């Protein structure tokens, strides 16, 4: 780990994959919705659509949907940078999720499976994601250390607000890339979030299950906390191991770290409490 004490005034968290289990929620929601549609006696689907829908791997579909989000945020920032247009219209993640769902349904040849209104409704699955078991209590434990807990996600404000209520996530602040008209890993997202909190970057710790997010936050002066989540890291094993050996994260919480069910954010809270005691 990086040298120096870790006593942040605020813990800012990536959300998708870090705090909530998007893969389980989205996959199961799509499966349930498709099964309901296929079993409805009131609906008359084209035979080709019915056959195709009955064979779809909805887990793979969900993964493609998620990957399209990553491509969207990266391409948006690249387009904004190359155009030099500060006033480039901002597209929210909600807008992207809707458009990409339409594209994926076309790619999978699922024409007519759902109506336009149903597609719009399904695209909002991302507002209602199930948290990792440790997340609500872990965030509450961090709050009790007098450390602010904030989202720092590419999800738009309404999405994060709905998710906080649905998943019982006790954030003290909701901060979104939308506030800055940009997407992570753009520096203005990290520095802007610190400014919104009235803090210097060094007083903030970024929590993520994605080393790329932490690398960008670190370059902006943030402390960094890596929390491993199953199937979330996009870096390959060699890159992950190199990051771990080089020790540029201030805290590393692996899948097996923590006692019993007290893993993930609960282990982060325990470590922060331990360091606070050691430095008091």
Image (spheres, rainbow, N blue to C red):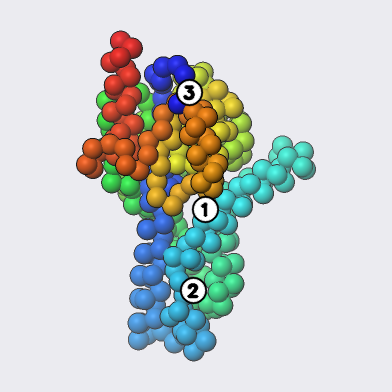
Q: Which type of secondary structure does the marked residue at label 3 adopt? A: loop
Vertical position of residue 213 compared to residue 28: above or below: above
In the rendered view, tell whether residue 102 sits above or below residue 225: below
Task: Find the residue positioned furthest to the right.
Answer: 83
- Residue at (32% x, 17% y) in the render: 276
- Other residues around mark 2 within 10 Å, as few (<14) / some (14–19) / many (≥20): few
Task: Where is residue 53? Give x, y as percent.
Answer: 46, 78
Q: Is residue 91 left or right of residue 171?
A: right
**Quarter of the image that includes the N terminus:** top left
Q: Closer to the camera: disc 1 or disc 3?
A: 3
Front label number (3 vs 2): 3
Which residue corresponds to mark 1? 94
Q: CA distance from mark 1 to mark 3?
A: 36 Å
Where residue 34 sits, quadrant-wise, is bottom left
Q: Residue at x 58, y 61 (%)?
A: 99
Q: Give me the disc on residue 2.
A: 3
Q: Residue at x 37, y 39 (%)?
A: 254
Q: Which residue is mark 2?
A: 115
**Residue 27 position in % (x across, y down):** 40, 63
Q: Is residue 178 above or below residue 1?
A: below
Q: Left or right: 132 with respect to 15?
A: left
Judged from this view, the residue extending furthest toward the bottom is 47
Label 1 crowd bin: few (<14), some (14–19), many (20+), radius 10 Å: many
Give the number of the disc on residue 180.
Answer: none
Q: For the residue labelled by badge 2, is the local secondary structure a helix, a strand or a loop?
A: loop
Asked if the residue under mark 1 is in contact with the one under mark 2, i.e. CB atoms within 8 Å, the reply is no
Calculate the distance from the C-alpha at mark 2 to the C-alpha at mark 1.
18 Å
Q: Position of residue 10 (x, y in %)?
A: 41, 24
């Amino acid at each position: 780990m990086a040298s120096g004490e870790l006593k942040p005034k605020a813990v800012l968290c990536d959300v998708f994959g870090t705090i909530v289990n998007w893969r389980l929620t989205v996959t199961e929601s799509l499966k349930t919705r498709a099964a309901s549609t296929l079993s409805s006696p009131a609906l008359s689907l084209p035979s080709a659509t019915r056959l195709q829908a009955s064979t779809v791997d909805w887990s793979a579909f969900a993964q493609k949907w998620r990957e399209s989000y990553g491509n969207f945020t990266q391409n948006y920032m690249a387009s904004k940078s190359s155009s030099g247009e500060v006033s480039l219209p901002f597209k929210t993640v909600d807008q992207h999720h809707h458009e990409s769902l339409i594209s994926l349904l076309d790619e999978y040849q699922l024409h007519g499976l759902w109506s336009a209104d149903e597609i719009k409704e399904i695209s909002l699955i991302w507002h209602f994601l199930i948290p990792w078991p440790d997340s609500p209590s872990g965030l509450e434990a961090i709050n009790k250390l007098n450390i602010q807990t904030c989202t720092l996600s590419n999800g738009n404000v309404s999405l994060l607000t709905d998710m906080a209520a649905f998943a019982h996530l006790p954030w003290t602040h909701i901060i979104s890339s939308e506030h800055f008209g940009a997407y992570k890993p753009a520096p203005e997202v990290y520095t802007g979030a610190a400014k919104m909190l009235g803090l210097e970057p060094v007083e903030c710790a970024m929590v993520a299950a994605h080393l790329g997010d932490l690398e960008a936050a670190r370059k902006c002066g943030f402390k960094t906390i890596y929390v491993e989540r199953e199937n979330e890291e996009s870096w390959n094993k060699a890159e992950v191991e190199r990051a771990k050996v080089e020790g540029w994260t201030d805290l590393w919480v692996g899948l097996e770290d923590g006692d019993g069910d007290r893993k993930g954010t609960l282990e982060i809270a325990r470590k922060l409490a331990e360091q606070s005691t050691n430095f008091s």
